[in-house]
Amino acid sequence: MILEELKTASLKHPPIFNSNHESYAVLLEEVEECKSALDFIERDMKVLWSEVKNDANNKELLTTLREMEKIAKNLVEESIQVGAMIEKFKRFLNDWLIIWNQ
């Protein structure tokens, strides 16, 4: 999944980073998107717990769970993007080592 995401991302963006700074910045952006999604899940867990404690009806519980499911799917996608950017960063560093060790 990660390598497929890297391939897709390379069609939209340059296949290699230009610097460590750029590599870090892109990776950080993806990590922050994951954290944001996780923050939403944690918020919804509090909502769900409140609903459970207050004996909410099943329709209300399902609404909250469906929203959490959407966010969880987004989190999976974002996590794959994090993995892809880690791989892209590693490839940048490996290419740099090859060039400078010749």
Image (cartoon, rainbow, N blue to C red):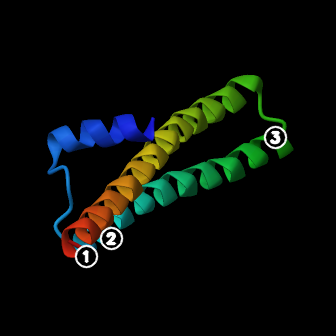
Mark 3 neighbour density, 10 Å: few (under 14) some (14–19) many (20 or more):
some
Report if the CB atoms under discs 1 and 2 are less than 8 Å apart: yes
Q: Amino acid at mark 3?
A: Val
Above or below, 39 against 1 in this view is below
- For the question of whether residue 26 can be seen, the reply is no
Label ID, residue 52? 3
Q: What mark, if any, has residue 24 been given in the picture? A: 2
SS state under label 2: helix
The residue wearing badge 1 is 21
Q: Position of residue 17 (x, y in %)?
A: 21, 62
Report the residue at 51% width, 45% height from top: 75
Q: Which callout, 1 or 3, points at the residue further toward the start of the chain? A: 1
Left or right of 81 on screen, residue 62: right
Please name whichever residue, 99 or 80, is drawn nearer the observer in this view of the structure: 99
The dot on residue 87 is: none
What amino acid is labelled 1 in the image?
His
Above/below status of 80 relative to 8: below
SS category of the residue bearing label 1? helix
Q: Give residue 89's position: percent from left, percent from top.
A: 33, 62
Which residue is at a point 71% across and 31% down the rendered structure image?
61
Choose mark 1 or mark 3, whichever is in front.
Answer: 1
Q: Residue at 76%, 48% (x, y): give it.
A: 50
